[in-house]
Amino acid sequence: MKKKFLGLAAAGAMLLTLAGCAGGGTSAGSSEGPKAADQLVVGFSQVGSESGWRTANTTDIQAAFKDAGIELKFSDAQQKQENQIKAIRSYIQQGVDVIAFSPVVETGWDAVLNEAKAANIPVVLTDRAVDSADDSLYESFLGSDFVEEGKKAGEWVLEEYKDSTEPVKIIQLEGTTGAAPAIDRAEGFADAIKGDDKFEVVASQTGDFTRAGGKQVTEALLKSNPDANLIYAHNDDMALGAIEAIEAAGLKPGVDIKIVSVDAVKDGMQALADGKINFIVECSPLLGKQLVDIVNQINEGETPEKRIITEETTFTKDQAAEALPTRQY
Ligand code: AHR
């Protein structure tokens, strides 16, 4: 796809060339090319502020664009797809150079992405994927491999219970229904544990990636499943909510009920170091610099990689204690 701002630059160059032919004094062949950083405008639509991860992601993206001297128009969709669609339409109307967004759910984006394409505005997906058959609707997708994250959580569970002959009853706290990380983390985890029938997911419900949701769902599910052994939370915030619910039920999180979660934000890492969470799979929110790089590549007329996967690790209790003093988020 011809990028909008190169398209405009090319149109400008044509005008200059015509002016040169007409003897207007401008040298022919000048100035098709990238815009200066301070001429670039990027519109970013964020999911919301549902978790510590999301707050860190917003802060990092805003800081990276400020450092790069590129204007970032920012909107918070408050976890609603219709708000994101509105924001994207508004960025199209404003004629921004690039639109970036982290889709709250996977489906339902083709119409608005086709509108961006028709307006020649390149789109970059950050953090979460869209479920579209047409991958020409976006330039690049930068973010984690959520299936892999779920798999790592499941592999830890396999190892943790390798010597146990008893059934292991698992409660799963799902992320936002229809969101890529909720779908993929459930899939990776299920795949990892499926070979051994001692593992049983006895209940699985959404806590919407929030601490309040994690607490509320855990309270209810512990009542219907008092013999649960383990909670698999799709993010740290829900795990932190689950800790409150477990303690309120007079049990010890990390001991009576083990917890594995995803993200590795500071509060989650502290709970891991304190022995209240047993294992965390990292999901890095620090996507700002890479997003700036992608915007710069598009500006230069280069084709960014279609899929850029974030590098991530996992943490045990000791590793969390070691990492905490220098943890950025
Ligand atoms: O899309 C990434 C997920 O969204 C994070 O794991 C979660 O904390 C956030 O809300």
Image (tube, rainbow, N blue to C red):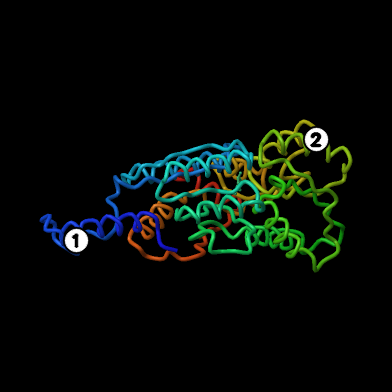
Q: Secondary structure at mark 1?
A: loop
> What is the number of the mark on residue 208?
none
Q: Position of residue 80 (x, y in %)?
A: 64, 39
Which amino acid type corresponds to the residue marked 1 in the rendered image? Ser
Residue most extreme to the bottom: 195
Q: Nearer the viewer, residue 283 or 20?
A: 20
In the picture provided, is 98 more to the left or to the right than 89? left
Earlier-in-chain disc, 1 versus 2:
1
Q: Nearer the viewer, mark 1 or mark 2?
A: 1
Q: Position of residue 101 (x, y in %)?
A: 52, 48
Q: Residue at x 55, y 53 (%)?
A: 113
In the picture provided, is 54 more to the left or to the right than 62? right
In the rendered image, the vertical position of residue 57 relative to residue 162, given as above or below: above
Q: Secondary structure at mark 2?
A: helix
Residue most extreme to the top: 248
Q: Position of residue 268 (x, y in %)?
A: 60, 42
**Within-10-Å neighbours for mark 1: few <14, some 14–19, many 20+:** few
Q: Nearer the viewer, residue 318 or 44?
A: 44
Q: Residue at x 75, y 39 (%)?
A: 252
Residue 61: image quadrant is top left
Residue marked by disc 2: 219
Q: Residue at x 70, y 50 (%)?
A: 178
Residue marked by disc 1: 30
**Numbered-mark total:** 2
Q: Is mark 1 within 8 Å of ligand 1?
A: no
